[in-house]
Amino acid sequence: MFVQPKVRLGNKNYTQTELQHLRKRNAQRYNRYVRDKVDSEYTKFYQSTAWRKMRVQVLTRDNYLCQHCLAKGIINDKDLIVHHIVELKQGWSKRLDIDNLETVCVSCHNKI
């Protein structure tokens, strides 16, 4: 008898079938909120020319280095994101304030 191997994700074990169902659900949720633009105000902002120009300015200011890693003495220039210190939902007026933006890597961004 064949037993499907389980995959550990977080603190749960899933079969391949359960994992596919979970991924499908997450994709549907992502499509609804991002691609189908339920949060259209935020989507428009992130696709705007003003944001793209500001993003390049922040990356240049920070020398294309993760500022959190740099504070620990690590030089990391991989997988960079421009992060809003005060999130958009809490401070829409600060969305293009250069002092509210910092360059971080994906790893550090996930810890914030």
Image: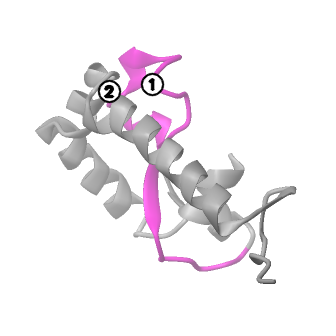
Residue 42's disc is 2
Report whether 85 appears left or right of 70: left
Among numbered discs 2 and 1, the one appearing first in the sequence: 2
Magenta segment: does it hold 63? Answer: no
For the point 75% across and 69% down, the residue is: 72
Q: Residue furthest left?
A: 49
Q: Quadrant of the N terminus?
A: bottom right
Could you tell me which secondary element the residue under label 2 belongs to? helix
Residue 110's disc is none
Q: Position of residue 91 (x, y in %)?
A: 48, 17
Q: Residue furthest bottom?
A: 1
Q: Which residues are magenta?
A: 73-101
For the point 37% across and 27% down, the residue is: 95
Q: Residues within 10 Å of mark 2 (few under 14, many from 20)?
A: some
Q: Are marks 2 and 1 in contact (CB under 8 Å)?
A: yes
Residue pointed to by mark 1: 88
Query: Which one is in front, 44 or 95?
Result: 44
